[in-house]
Amino acid sequence: EVARALAQDSSPGALADGNPLALLANVGTPGAAAHAAGQSVEGVGLLRTEALFLGRATPPSHAEQAAAYAAVLTSFGERKVVIRTLDAGADKPLAFAAMPAEENPALGVRAYRLVRTRPSLLDTQLGAIADAAAMTGRMPWVMAPMIATPAEARDFARRARSHGLPTVGVMVEVPAAALRADAILAEVDFVSIGVDDLAQYTMAADRLRDELADLVDPFWPPVLDLVAATAAAGERCGKPVGVCGESASDPVMAVVLAGLGVTSLSMGPTAVPAVRYALSRHTEQEVRDVADAARSADGAPQARAAALAAMSPDV
Ligand code: PEP
Ligand code: MG
């Protein structure tokens, strides 16, 4: 009964003292978006677009892409939708692109870096997103995955704006970008932290290796430090810094991320009610204290335990 009451609460995400923290959905297909639109989320914080591209002999046409993006925009109406450009490569090879095998695919020509070898993929995608906006009258935000340098952020922003897309961001998933978040943010309107890849690259541990799962945990205090540095850069320039890794679906992690200063959280939509409740039980000062407790620990399990111990007992 409590669970049902929570699931029906569609109020915007906020801390106990009213500070807003938007709660958004991660989705990967128009069907998933239509389903998520019926749940109590404030929009889409991460539309993954890989499903359109994988496992096919030819790339999706401009028109096919525009129709898919338009369907998502229509499902969400007035609500915010953040579309991420193609995050292929590494574990997600493109059958039609004859990508060379790489020794270290997670460090290779993947995600935004495909612009080096196949720039038309990105430009076609941005054009299709702009057409979807024109078809629906709804303007999405767009962002690029796995940006490492300010020059990459500048190049992506230039391409997106040249297609008439006004609100442009990049993902912070690489420590280099988190450490120089001020310079990255100077090029774009917002950033979104991919906290799972940020953990992989900070701890130098492959997300796909079960043997290393303990290392690929965003509760590692060095990962929390990089989230805090990125959020602080956003506060300095007054631009949004969200988190869109699946790990944000853990209510303990969500409270820690709020305490580190991020301005929105995006996650699988079914996780939103529990996260909304956990945030609503803590004030700004309390979430900061929870985050400080986590950052003071010397390992990931200890950080989660310290955060939990510092949280309100009824969460
Ligand atoms: C992440 O890395 O945290 C992220 C949101 O991107 P993906 O899970 O799609 O790699
Ligand atoms: Mg990622």
Image (cartoon, rainbow, N blue to C red):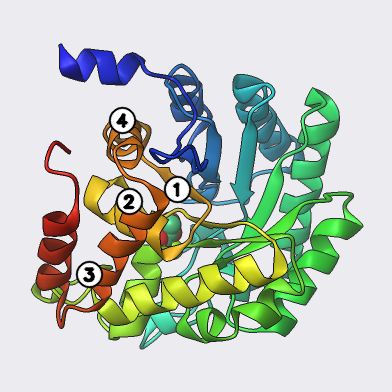
Q: Position of residue 52 (x, y in %)?
A: 54, 43
Instruction: Give the residue type that dot 4 points to.
Output: Thr
Q: Nearer the viewer, residue 59 or 90?
A: 90
Residue shown at 35% from the left, 83% from the top: 202
Q: Distance between the residues labelled 2 and 4?
A: 14 Å
Tag 4 or tag 1, which sits nearer the N-term?
Answer: 1
For the residues labelled 1 and 2, say whether their Cβ atoms are less than 8 Å apart: yes
For label 3, the residue is 293
Instruction: Give the residue type that dot 3 points to.
Output: Ala
For label 1, the residue is 265
Q: Nearer the viewer, residue 27 or 5?
A: 5
Q: Distance between the residues labelled 1 and 2?
A: 7 Å
Kindly state the secondary structure of the residue where label 1 is placed: strand
Kindly state the secondary structure of the residue where label 4 is placed: helix
Picture layout, residue 149 above or below residue 185: below
Label count reads 4
For label 4, the residue is 270
User: In screen coordinates, is 53 left or right of 207?
Assistant: right
Residue shown at 38% from the left, 69% from the top: 197
Picture layout, residue 16 above or below residue 32: below
Instruction: Give the residue type that dot 1 points to.
Output: Leu
